[in-house]
Amino acid sequence: MSHRNKTYIAFASEDLSHYWLMKAWRQNEHADFDFFNAHDLYEARGSLSPETIKRQLRERLNNTRQVILLGSEDCRRKGGDGDSFLAYEIEVILELDLPIVIANLCQSRDIVAENIPQPLLDHNHFNVSVPFQPKIIRYALDNYVAGYGKGEMQGTHRYVQRIYNELGL
């Protein structure tokens, strides 16, 4: 296995425009994180079997250090339906015990259960919810993910107002 140094972005296909915006952040704001483009697989879905797509998703997740999940109602629905590729990604993320930053597309700083796929809630997977903004997402990747392996916490968390104040948000 290659070195696990990538950030994987998981999202419902309905939220693809937000993924494209993140790609623009990376270029325009010089964000210091990179991620796999899972949707390259979906563009070729007509020529690839679901098993092949799932195998490629697993390979990408095996080489991932952390996950950003674009939290939305569509994400919750598809991530918990047991049939979609997003549901498969969630299953593998849980299996590999990868840290997850949930970027709420509704911009909420709070935990929005309506944006979180049920399997993450059912497994009490430790994750952090932030608004869909590059500065706080970068902060979460630098701070939450680094402490993830300690295994001291469970469930969904959020940052207190002081963190947003320190970041000028």
Image (spheres, rainbow, N blue to C red):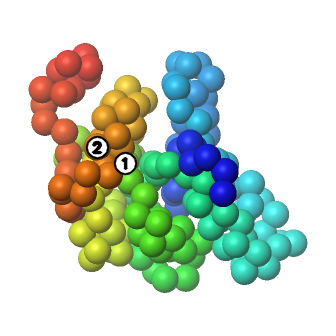
Amino acid type, residue under disc 2 in the picture:
Gly
The number of discs equals 2
Residue located beneath label 1 in the image? 101
Which residue is pictured at 52% across the width and 26% down the height?
A: 32
Q: How far is disc 2 from disc 1 in space, using C-alphas?
A: 13 Å
Which residue is pictured at 25% across the width and 16% down the height?
A: 168
Q: Which of the numbered marks, if any, corresponds to residue 131?
A: none
Q: Quadrant of residue 53?
A: bottom right
Q: Going by the image, does 19 lie left or right of 118?
A: right
Q: Going by the image, does 61 lie left or right of 141?
A: right
Mark 2 surroundings within 10 Å by alpha-carbon count, few (fewer than 14), some (14 through 19), many (20 or more): few
Check disc 1 and report its element: helix, strand or loop.
strand
Residue 15, image x, y percentages: 53, 53
Residue 92, image x, y percentages: 51, 70
Amino acid type, residue under disc 1 in the picture:
Val
N-term-proximal mark, 2 vs 1: 1
Mark 1 surroundings within 10 Å by alpha-carbon count, few (fewer than 14), some (14 through 19), many (20 or more): many
Residue located beneath label 2 in the image? 147
Front-lying residue, 42 or 3: 3
User: Could you tell me which quadrant the N terminus lies in?
Assistant: bottom right
Residue 157, image x, y percentages: 20, 51
Residue 55, image x, y percentages: 70, 72
Choose mark 2 or mark 1, whichever is in front. Answer: 2
Which residue is pictured at 38% across the width and 53% down the height?
A: 100
Q: Is residue 1 visible?
A: yes
Which residue is pictured at 42% across the width and 76% down the height?
A: 80
Residue 22 vertical placement versus 121 (above, below): above
Q: Quadrant of residue 60?
A: bottom right
User: Could you tell me which quadrant the C terminus lies in?
Assistant: top left
